[in-house]
Amino acid sequence: MEYVNLGRAGVRVSRICLGCFSFGEDAAWKVGLDRAQGLVKRAIDLGWNFFDTANVYSSGRSEEITGECLKGYRDNVVVATKVYFPTGEGPNESGLSRRHITRRIRTSLKRLQMDYVDLYQIHRWDYNTPIQETM
Protein backbone atom coordinates (compact mmCIF):
# COMPACT_ATOMS: atom_id res chain seq x y z
CA MET A 1 0.00 0.00 0.00
CA GLU A 2 1.21 3.52 -0.75
CA TYR A 3 0.97 6.05 2.08
CA VAL A 4 0.85 9.84 1.84
CA ASN A 5 1.03 12.70 4.30
CA LEU A 6 -2.25 13.96 5.73
CA GLY A 7 -1.60 17.64 5.16
CA ARG A 8 1.18 18.86 7.43
CA ALA A 9 0.05 16.88 10.47
CA GLY A 10 2.89 14.36 10.35
CA VAL A 11 0.36 11.57 9.93
CA ARG A 12 0.64 9.03 7.10
CA VAL A 13 -2.52 7.62 5.55
CA SER A 14 -3.16 5.02 2.92
CA ARG A 15 -3.74 6.56 -0.48
CA ILE A 16 -7.10 4.76 -0.43
CA CYS A 17 -9.60 5.74 2.26
CA LEU A 18 -12.61 3.60 3.09
CA GLY A 19 -15.65 5.87 3.02
CA CYS A 20 -18.29 4.61 5.43
CA PHE A 21 -21.26 6.57 4.01
CA SER A 22 -23.12 3.35 3.22
CA PHE A 23 -22.82 1.87 6.73
CA GLY A 24 -26.29 1.61 8.26
CA GLU A 25 -29.50 -0.38 8.04
CA ASP A 26 -32.07 2.26 7.10
CA ALA A 27 -32.21 1.53 3.33
CA ALA A 28 -31.95 -1.49 1.06
CA TRP A 29 -28.55 -0.36 -0.27
CA LYS A 30 -27.02 0.19 3.18
CA VAL A 31 -24.29 -2.05 4.62
CA GLY A 32 -25.12 -3.54 8.02
CA LEU A 33 -22.69 -4.31 10.82
CA ASP A 34 -21.81 -7.87 9.77
CA ARG A 35 -20.96 -6.92 6.20
CA ALA A 36 -19.20 -3.74 7.31
CA GLN A 37 -16.94 -5.74 9.63
CA GLY A 38 -15.87 -7.88 6.69
CA LEU A 39 -15.19 -4.83 4.53
CA VAL A 40 -13.15 -3.09 7.23
CA LYS A 41 -11.14 -6.22 8.00
CA ARG A 42 -10.36 -6.68 4.32
CA ALA A 43 -9.33 -3.02 3.98
CA ILE A 44 -7.01 -3.34 6.98
CA ASP A 45 -5.57 -6.58 5.62
CA LEU A 46 -4.79 -4.70 2.38
CA GLY A 47 -2.96 -1.99 4.35
CA TRP A 48 -5.64 0.68 4.32
CA ASN A 49 -5.47 2.75 7.48
CA PHE A 50 -7.78 5.67 6.66
CA PHE A 51 -11.53 5.58 7.40
CA ASP A 52 -14.06 8.36 6.82
CA THR A 53 -17.60 8.85 8.10
CA ALA A 54 -19.89 11.71 9.19
CA ASN A 55 -22.30 12.37 12.02
CA VAL A 56 -25.30 12.51 9.68
CA TYR A 57 -24.65 9.35 7.66
CA SER A 58 -27.55 7.01 8.44
CA SER A 59 -28.56 9.40 11.25
CA GLY A 60 -25.38 8.58 13.17
CA ARG A 61 -25.50 4.82 12.64
CA SER A 62 -22.52 4.97 10.26
CA GLU A 63 -20.34 6.29 13.10
CA GLU A 64 -21.61 3.55 15.41
CA ILE A 65 -20.82 0.82 12.89
CA THR A 66 -17.46 2.37 12.01
CA GLY A 67 -16.50 2.49 15.68
CA GLU A 68 -17.59 -1.08 16.26
CA CYS A 69 -15.63 -2.28 13.23
CA LEU A 70 -12.46 -0.47 14.28
CA LYS A 71 -12.36 -1.84 17.83
CA GLY A 72 -8.95 -3.36 18.39
CA TYR A 73 -7.46 -1.39 15.49
CA ARG A 74 -7.68 2.16 16.88
CA ASP A 75 -3.95 2.66 17.41
CA ASN A 76 -3.25 1.69 13.79
CA VAL A 77 -5.93 3.63 11.91
CA VAL A 78 -6.72 7.24 11.08
CA VAL A 79 -10.38 8.15 11.56
CA ALA A 80 -12.14 11.14 10.04
CA THR A 81 -15.67 12.38 10.64
CA LYS A 82 -17.55 15.52 9.72
CA VAL A 83 -19.84 18.22 11.11
CA TYR A 84 -22.36 20.69 9.71
CA PHE A 85 -25.74 19.23 8.74
CA PRO A 86 -28.82 19.27 11.02
CA THR A 87 -28.92 16.70 13.78
CA GLY A 88 -32.18 17.87 15.35
CA GLU A 89 -35.10 20.24 14.99
CA GLY A 90 -33.90 23.42 16.72
CA PRO A 91 -32.30 26.49 15.13
CA ASN A 92 -28.91 25.61 16.63
CA GLU A 93 -28.83 21.99 15.49
CA SER A 94 -26.74 22.63 12.38
CA GLY A 95 -23.92 24.79 11.18
CA LEU A 96 -20.40 25.52 12.27
CA SER A 97 -20.84 27.56 15.44
CA ARG A 98 -18.61 26.70 18.38
CA ARG A 99 -21.71 25.48 20.21
CA HIS A 100 -22.77 23.10 17.44
CA ILE A 101 -19.25 21.79 16.79
CA THR A 102 -18.59 21.15 20.48
CA ARG A 103 -21.86 19.31 20.96
CA ARG A 104 -21.52 17.26 17.78
CA ILE A 105 -17.94 16.10 18.42
CA ARG A 106 -19.06 14.78 21.80
CA THR A 107 -21.87 12.76 20.24
CA SER A 108 -19.61 11.57 17.41
CA LEU A 109 -16.97 10.34 19.86
CA LYS A 110 -19.63 8.51 21.86
CA ARG A 111 -21.00 6.79 18.75
CA LEU A 112 -17.50 5.94 17.51
CA GLN A 113 -16.55 4.67 21.00
CA MET A 114 -13.30 6.64 20.72
CA ASP A 115 -11.46 9.26 22.74
CA TYR A 116 -10.48 11.29 19.67
CA VAL A 117 -10.77 11.53 15.91
CA ASP A 118 -7.72 12.24 13.79
CA LEU A 119 -9.45 14.52 11.31
CA TYR A 120 -12.58 16.54 12.04
CA GLN A 121 -13.84 18.01 8.80
CA ILE A 122 -16.26 20.75 7.85
CA HIS A 123 -18.90 18.98 5.76
CA ARG A 124 -19.86 22.18 3.95
CA TRP A 125 -19.43 25.92 4.27
CA ASP A 126 -21.61 27.77 6.78
CA TYR A 127 -22.46 31.21 5.39
CA ASN A 128 -24.09 32.22 8.68
CA THR A 129 -21.04 31.67 10.90
CA PRO A 130 -17.79 33.63 10.55
CA ILE A 131 -14.84 31.35 9.84
CA GLN A 132 -13.07 32.75 12.94
CA GLU A 133 -15.88 31.29 15.07
CA THR A 134 -15.57 27.92 13.37
CA MET A 135 -11.80 27.76 13.72
Image (cartoon, rainbow, N blue to C red):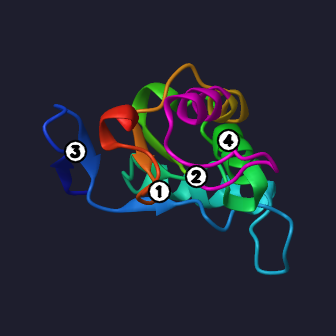
Q: Where is residue 44 in the image (x, y as percent from the top left)?
A: 47, 49
CA–CA distance in space, label 2 to label 4: 18 Å
Left or right position of 59 against 129: right
Kind of residue at badge 3: Leu
Q: Where is residue 85 in the image (x, y as percent from the top left)?
A: 61, 56
Which of these two is toward me, 74 or 95? Answer: 95
Which one is closest to the eye, mark 3 or mark 1?
Answer: 1
Choose the circle earlier in sequence order: 3 or 2: 3
Kind of residue at badge 4: Asn
Kindly give the residue lying farthest to the top in the view shown: 115
Mark on residue 123?
Answer: 1
**The magenta stretch spans which residues?**
85-106
Which of these two is toward me, 86 or 91? Answer: 91
Residue 38 is drawn in which quadrant? bottom right
User: Is residue 66 magenta-colored?
Assistant: no
Which one is closest to the eye, mark 1 or mark 4?
Answer: 4
Kind of residue at badge 1: His
Task: Identify the residue position indicated by label 3 in the image.
Answer: 6
| Contact between labelled residues 4 and 1, with CB atoms less than 8 Å apart | no
| Contact between labelled residues 2 and 1, with CB atoms less than 8 Å apart | yes
